[in-house]
Image: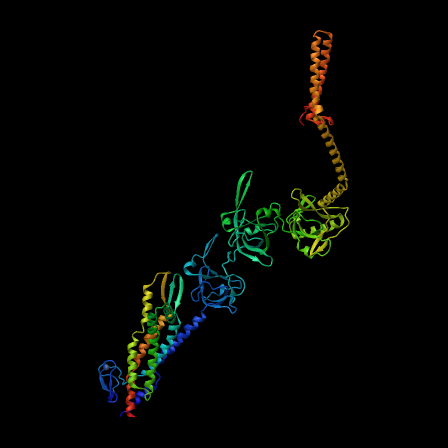
Amino acid sequence: MSSGQSARARGLAGCHSCLLVMSIDTEHCPRCHARVHSRTPNSLQRTVALIVVACILYLPANLLPITNTVYLGSYAPSTIIGGVITLWQMGSYPIALVILIASVLVPVGKLVVLSYLCWAASRPQLANPRQCARLYRLTEFIGRWSMIDVFVVAILVALIKLGNIISFYPGFAALSFAAVVIITMIAAEQFDPRLIWDNLESNDHD
Amino acid sequence: MTEPTATVSAARRISPIWFMPLLVILIGGWVTTHYYLSQGPLVEIAFATAEGLEAGRTRVRALSVDVGVVKDIQLTDDLQGVNVSVQLNPGTDRLLHADTQFWVVRPRLNASGVSGLGTLLSGPYIELYPGSDGKGERRYTGLDDAPHTPPGVAGVRVELFGTHASSVSVGAPILHRGLQVGQVESVDLDMARSQIRISAFIDAPFDQLVTEGTRFWNASGISLRTGAEGVQVDAESLTAVLSGGIAFAVPSQGTKGEPVEAGSRFELFASQQAAESDPYRFAKRYVLQFEQSLRGLDEGAPVEYRGIRVGTVERILREELAKAHTSAIAVPVVIRLEPGRFGMPDNAESVELLSERIEDTVATMGLRASLQTGNLITGGLFVAIDHHPDQQTAHIGEFNGLSTLPTISGGIERLGQQLSTLLSKLNALPLEQTTEELNSTLASARHTLQSIEQLSRSEAVTALPEQLAETLESARTLLDSLGQDSALQQEAERNLRTLDSTLRKANNLLDGLQAQPSSLLFPTQQAPDPEPRTPQ
Ligand SMILES: [Zn+2]
């Protein structure tokens, strides 16, 4: 199966703002005057930097309590993992699984996959571009589900407020978890998938 | 083919995006440092049990203000208790002192009231009492239970020792003239002394009422007394009836003395009567060694000096009987002489003074102790101390660490001696011989009487009156034939009358003999004539 020729190989580049196709040497788009790049500049660096930020924020998101429950006057903070364990012990296996997948596996998986893609993009000889493209599409698909925990907390806090009898308060982890999800999305956005296929081209050249 | 040189060089440039992770690390580092710097002190408290405590949930409060939370609960290495790590809030360093106390507040319900109800919903919490002395520490030992008297409350804590815990429970009131002035904090058994130890706290300003002369007694329950004035019910207070109580007062006979220090020990009497009857705290103990029967001598019997009570028999040292190996076994009796009863102040100096005086008197004036009979019917004994100048000089001795007072045999023993002399004299009399002689006399008397009776019943004697009557009849016929008016007849009639009266008398005599044969020997008993007398 022929991979065809990329725009860059043909000396062409597309404007990022209005998608106008022009010569690769053009500095500014003649239509919208945006800067024209053949590839997103510093794409890998940006992605890696954002992955690092997300990883840092992932620590407080899991170590600090995501909700503080006041139940009959007693104050109970609970972390994400603590909540999963409690639910599992209570026998609510489906809910425990959903929270485990949405709050732990999805963000961690996304970060791992993005890191792998960045590594693959910088090591053209070692990676399989088709596999990389499949992984990239997977990150785009699962990324939208990872905010579920934040939504649950937001709903609990808003709905259940009965003073000292039972109340929920968001913990700092809710904030950092939301930040992890958002920054992972931005990181995925910053990754230029064309880099995957650039390898294929250079491979063809060799 | 164009080489993408420009792109390559651009990739090598460090992107400004790297500022972001740096910023996050900086912020994270600052927040973490600030968090740890602003953390309050971490304190470890040892408790006997972690009942109701939960790591991360149980709060620490001082005067109902949240000051921290339990972080961790660990069993101690010897598995005898728990170590509770408590994270106190920032700025709570000034709550910690050397005398800071921690205890777990749980709901508590007893007769004197309900406390800790709030913990029914919120669960137990750890109360922190800050204290005021010394520098804060990192390790404390928690109290097992909330102190019944909150720390820092002015008052005095005393220890009461009694033989029976009878219905005195923790939280029971301490009463003075029926008013609650304190409470029982703990009731336990002193193993060494085998006594009940009660810790009691008397609140200020009533602590001034607890003086050297104060007596405590068990005021639990209701006492019923029936007497000439009807039934009398005594009860200190409803609380005392329910949970038991202890009352105190200075006995009417006692002296007040100085207010006591904290931790002073008092005896707990079983009743107010017992407390009143023993109103002196200080006493000098003496051992008396009696070589006579102690039957009737009870522990608690009075010790009297010339009829005035000066002390009490405390104990009869029965265990010394087993140790004795000499032929003359003296039973030691411990008595206590109370200076207060001599009119001296009830304190330790008076005890010294009293013992010195007794030592002098024993040596110079023959002071001796003896057993006397107090009650002739029950045989109850008491110890009498008196001067016996005729006795040889004696000195205060020593027995098992106690002074001994010389004794002489008392009244009961002398009486016994006299009785035995009297009995031996009686034994010596020839009673048996006398009795035998008397018996034989009586037997011969009876024999005589029997022969008389036989005689009186013989036919000859009984036939005699009939023969006489026949003779008279024939005489009458003779006289009738003689004629009524003749002098002979008259003479004969007169003679016959005389004979007739004589015969009547003989008949009477015979009748009397028949009824009472002994009247021949002994004169007939006749009751004396009643004499009028003036009533005395
Ligand atoms: Zn354009």
- Residue found 57% across the figure and 55% down from its top: B196
Quadrant of the rendered image containing residue A183: bottom left
Q: Does B18 sit above or below residue A154?
A: below
Drawn side of residue B61 relative to residue A149, left or right: right
Tell which of B399 and B42 is nearer to you: B399
Q: Does B52 sit above or below residue B414?
A: below
Quadrant of the rendered image containing residue A142: bottom left
User: Split into 4 quadrants, where in the image is the N terminus of chain B?
Assistant: bottom left
**Residue B343 appears in view:** no
Drawn side of residue B186 relative to residue B319, left or right: left
* Residue B162 rendering spot, x and y as whole percentages: 58, 53
Drawn side of residue B314 relative to residue B85, left or right: right
- Residue found 33% across the figure and 70% down from its top: A95
**Residue A77 appears in view:** yes
* Residue B427 rendering spot, x and y as whole percentages: 75, 42
Q: Does B231 sit above or below residue B364?
A: above
Q: Quadrant of ligand 1?
A: bottom left
Q: How many marks?
A: 0
Please name the colour scheme applied to the rendered image: rainbow
User: Split into 4 quadrants, where in the image is the C terminus of chain B?
Assistant: top right
Q: Does B480 sit above or below residue B512?
A: above
Tell which of B529 and A180 is nearer to you: B529
Tell which of B321 and B31 is nearer to you: B321
* Residue B56 rendering spot, x and y as whole percentages: 43, 67
* Residue A123 rendering spot, x and y as whole percentages: 34, 87
